[in-house]
Image (spheres, rainbow, N blue to C red):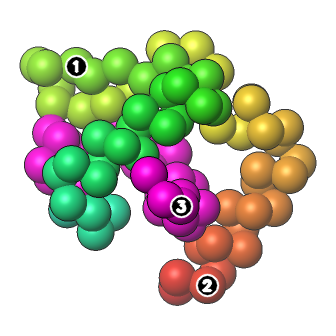
Amino acid sequence: MKYIDLKKILYMDTLIQRKCTGNPERFAEKIDLSRSVFFDYLSYMRNELMLDIEYNVYTETYYYNGQDLCSVLGNIRCIACKEKFISETA
């Protein structure tokens, strides 16, 4: 993958925290990525950020099985970044 769009990572994190991602196709659509690029982003979050992200086939949603992005980055920095992201997209 050539580059990572931080806004997409933050949006993915928000949807995963809320457990409202939908299936992989729907999740990719929500964040405006192709299915294959979506899996690249998911792989980046799992491998590079070392987040334990799992998928529940019954509820059709991704969820954190442990720490979320804010826990890894540090709560204050993550919250400030998310607030800026939300204000820019509103």
**Is residue 46 visible in the rendered structure shown here?**
yes
Q: Amino acid at mark 3?
A: Tyr
Most distant residue in the right direction? 76
Task: Tell me, yes or no, whether the two marked residues, 3 and 2, touch with CB atoms within 8 Å.
Answer: no
| Secondary structure beneath label 1 | strand
To which residue does mark 3 refer? 3
Picture coordinates of residue 19, whole percent (x, y): 36, 36
Alpha-carbon span between mark 1 and mark 3? 28 Å
| Secondary structure beneath label 3 | loop
Front in this rendered view, residue 47 or 74: 47
To which residue does mark 1 refer? 56
Query: From the viewer's perspective, is 41 left or right of 28?
Result: right
Task: Tell me, yes or no, whether the two marked residues, 2 and 1, touch with CB atoms within 8 Å.
Answer: no
Prevalent SS, magenta region: helix
Closer to the chain start, of discs 2 and 1, is 1
Closer to the chain start, of discs 3 and 2, is 3
Q: Amino acid at mark 1?
A: Asn
- Range of the magenta residues? 1-28
Q: Amino acid at mark 2?
A: Glu
Reply yes or no: does residue 20 show up in magenta.
Answer: yes
**Is residue 18 visible in the rendered structure shown here?**
no
